[in-house]
Amino acid sequence: MVTFIIEASHLFRSGDKFQTQFFVMDVVNYLRRNFFDNTEDFHTVVLHGSTKDEQAERYTAALERFDVKVVRMRPIASIAGANKVYYKPTWYLHKMMGREIPQGSDLMMVGFHNPRYLTFLQKYAKDYTFSMAAFTTPSKKQGWMQIPKEFTPYLKHIVNLDDHVAEIKAEFKKKHTKTE
């Protein structure tokens, strides 16, 4: 079984960068076809942080139509300033490991390319086969962030999604041009 774990804000930020919208299932289907032998044995989980209830409910409903599990992360007040919040994706990931995601599973993590995820990979590498895909994104601390070289020993597949934008966008067209 392959579990695709998507950090939703990564797709939103990347869509802004490429002036498009990346749909979760288009990214999953592209990766599944090209890196996991088009397996039918897969599960998709999206970690989504939103402070707007109505927006989060619409997003969740849209994804659940495709059997995607949406985990709405709860905002944590930041000491950096009034009305600033942050999210702790690893808290949710730790809860899934061994319970929802059985040991021995393949995991394709999309958008988890911040160096802070290294300890997560190190902790679970003996029990899971990890792969990672990410668009290059800006970071205030790291400049342009890509999948860190330190992650390499823990990853089966390393996919820079910047190189696959056209193919991912073509996934949407494939769904909507089939007439037979």
Image (spheres, grey):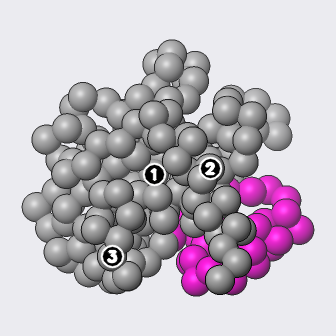
Q: Which of marks 2 and 1 is in front?
A: 2
Q: Residue at x 74, y 34 (%)?
A: 19
Image location of residue 133, percent across then percent down: 40, 46
Residue 7: quadrant of the picture: bottom right
Tag in front: 1 or 3? 3
- Magenta span includes 109: no
> Which quarter of the figure is the C terminus placed in?
bottom right
Residue 52 appears left or right of 113: right
Instruction: Find the distance from the CA under tag 3 to the CA under tag 2.
Output: 20 Å
Taking depth in this image into account, of 171 and 144 the one nearest to the observer is 171
Q: SS of the residue at dot 2?
A: helix
Q: What stretch is highlighted in magenta?
A: 45-74
Q: Say what secondary structure mark 1 lies in.
A: strand
Q: Is residue 51 left or right of residue 46?
A: right
Lower position in the chain sequence, tag 2 or tag 1: 1
| For residue 135, above or below residue 122 | above
Q: Pointer 3: what residue?
A: 39
User: Which residue is label 1 attached to?
Assistant: 110
Inspect this view and state whether residue 86 appears. yes
Inspect the image, locate mark 1, and give the three-letter code of the amino acid beneath it: Val
What is the CA distance from the residue labelled 2 to the residue labelled 1?
A: 16 Å
Where does label 2 land, which residue? Answer: 169
